[in-house]
Image (tube, rainbow, N blue to C red):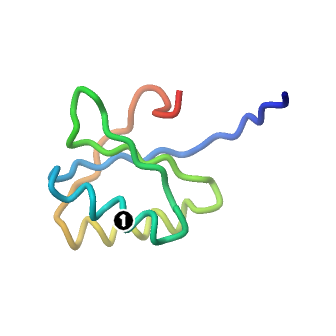
Amino acid sequence: MNVLNIDMPVRSIKVNIKDIGYIRWCLESHDGIANPTTRMETPEILDLTIAPHFLEDAEGLIDALVAELGIERVDGPSTSPLL
């Protein structure tokens, strides 16, 4: 089996846990622009793994969510959330 080594950008946001469903819906409704995962130790942090060709659109969507919900950008994880 061939495995592609594609560097997937990750952006992280701190959210109110009650907003996670809405944020996931926003991501899915935009052609699955990012794959959100919560951190086990801090469930209010969402790590968004983004396909490289969606990065500019994802940044715009994150900015819109920051403005709408008052969420904040935080430092990304030390390892990929997909590993």
State the residue at coordinates (27%, 58%).
21
State the residue at coordinates (65%, 60%).
53
State the residue at coordinates (60%, 53%).
51
- For the N terminus, the quadrant is top right
Say which of 76 and 47 sits in front: 47
In the visual, does 34 lie left or right of 38?
Answer: right
x and y, in percent, of residue 76 in the image: 38, 38
State the residue at coordinates (50%, 31%).
80
Q: How crowded is mark 1: few (under 14 residues within 10 Å), some or many (20 or more)?
A: few
Label 1 residue SS: helix
- Residue at the disc numbered 1: 25
Task: Report the number of numbered marks.
Answer: 1
Above-or-below relation of 29 to 80: below
Say which amino acid is labelled 1: Trp
x and y, in percent, of residue 32 in the image: 52, 62
Above-or-below relation of 74 to 28: above
Say which of 16 and 22 sits in front: 22
x and y, in percent, of residue 20 in the image: 25, 55
Q: Quadrant of residue 61?
A: bottom left
x and y, in percent, of residue 24 in the image: 36, 59
In the visual, does 81 lie left or right of 23?
Answer: right
In the visual, does 21 lie left or right of 70?
Answer: right
